[in-house]
Amino acid sequence: MSTGSLLRTAFTRKLYLTVLVSIVLGAILGLAAPGVGAALQPVGSGFIELIQMLIAPIVFCTIVTGIASAGELASVGRIGMKALVYFEVLTTVALVVGLLVMNAFKPGSGIHADPGALHLSGTAQQYARAGASQHWYDFLVNIIPNTLVGAFTGGNVLQVLLVSILFAVAVKALGERGARVVEAVERIGEVMFGIVKLVMYLAPLGAFAAMAYTTGKFGASTLASLGGVVLLFWATGIAFCLVVFGAVARLCGIRILKLYRYFKDELLITLGTSNYEVVMPQLMRKLEHLGCPKRIVGLVVPSGYAFNGDGVCLYLGFASLYIAQAFDVNLSIWQQIGLLAVFMITSKGSAGVAGAGFVILAATLSATGTVPIAGIMLVLGVDRFLSTMRGLVSLCGQMLGSVVVSRWEGVFDRERARRVLSGRETVRETVATE
């Protein structure tokens, strides 16, 4: 095969390679021609919106078919409780790690910022107002949509979860009469995944435009001004993904690096777009292929996007102490524990909130009053770079959620997972045999 043929094959069948090259080219364009790079924002945002418009129907179809095939309804509740336990434990660990790293390195010390000299910009004021309106019970209030159809148009995953579960339970109560409804929903789900496959051909273009916009809008100087903070957060995120998630993966009988290699397409798309929601559909499909039952994947993954923001929690502990250190606010161990307790509650209300990490940070700072809320201006300029690692860490947490619950339920096909992760069984081979 000629060199040209090899390149064409790589770029048409190896999505991760195409996306990686697109990210590099986008960064080069943004640095070389900032105006052109910044002007590409609609292209990157358009790709993200194309995927996001499919998330609600995909979540609905997978949850309905998953619960319908789950046997007794009691097993659904058991799976949900185990998923919530996993989410709570991992997000708490992420919060603690963020606090420990900041106490150890203290990157904000020496800045000696004056709260009175900082004024909230228009964007920061929007985040602060959104944060001030966020309460610990918001996730309970926001879970109920105004209308049934509104759950699918509001962009709130929690509302889609509620409608999907209620619909699935009602259909299951019909017994044999509901079989045709379930079959129809399953066919619609297949169509939705088919649309996702078509849209994913645009992933390299979306990643290229998103990276060009990021570097063109903020430039290398913005990153350099707070480069130490960005690098420390990225190093913390990478270490968290390798050590903490590595330990969890080992308990499940798999190796974390092989798992990341299996999901390399999804990781690179998240790296390029700073949005890990766009990979939800293919994440669910690949988890099923890995050896997790469809009924568990269909419930755990959508719930995880609402409740399992490991990256957001890591960021919250990190950013809050950085701002406190910059203002020379010495928080005692008990004050830090208090912040952690508040974050454990407020972080669960992030589903469907744009810039969730920033909103929750503003909400907690305004609620506790121990750290000046004006401090969010200190990290606003590099939040785009921090949000990329937030998304990558959260995505890694979503990869393991279904694996952990499946293992806990005793239904995780570990031998199949090892074959898949070692490359001895491909998705195409599995589809051909079904």
Image (tube, rainbow, N blue to C red):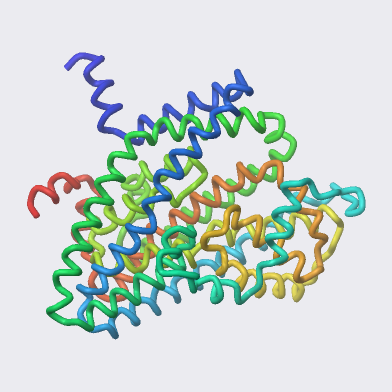
Q: Residue at x 18, y 46 (%)?
A: 426
Q: Quadrant of residue 195?
A: top left
Q: Residue at x 19, y 69 (%)?
A: 181
Can residue 297 be seen from the camera position used here?
no
Q: Nearer the viewer, residue 350 or 2?
A: 350
Q: Is residue 115 left or right of residue 421?
A: right
Q: Quadrant of residue 304?
A: bottom left
Can residue 423 be seen from the camera position used here?
yes
Question: In the rendered view of the protein, which quadrant contains the N terminus?
Answer: top left
Q: Nearer the viewer, residue 24 or 246?
A: 24
Q: Is residue 296 left or right of residue 329?
A: left
Question: In the rendered view of the protein, which quadrant contains the C terminus?
Answer: bottom left
Counting every numbered tag in the picture gives 0
Q: Residue at x 91, y 48 (%)?
A: 117
Q: Position of residue 139 (x, y in %)?
A: 55, 72
Q: Position of residue 305 (x, y in %)?
A: 45, 61
Q: Residue at x 44, y 54 (%)?
A: 395
279 shown above or below 308: above
149 shown above or below 195: below
Q: Position of residue 390 (x, y in %)?
A: 55, 52
Q: Position of residue 128 (x, y in %)?
A: 73, 58
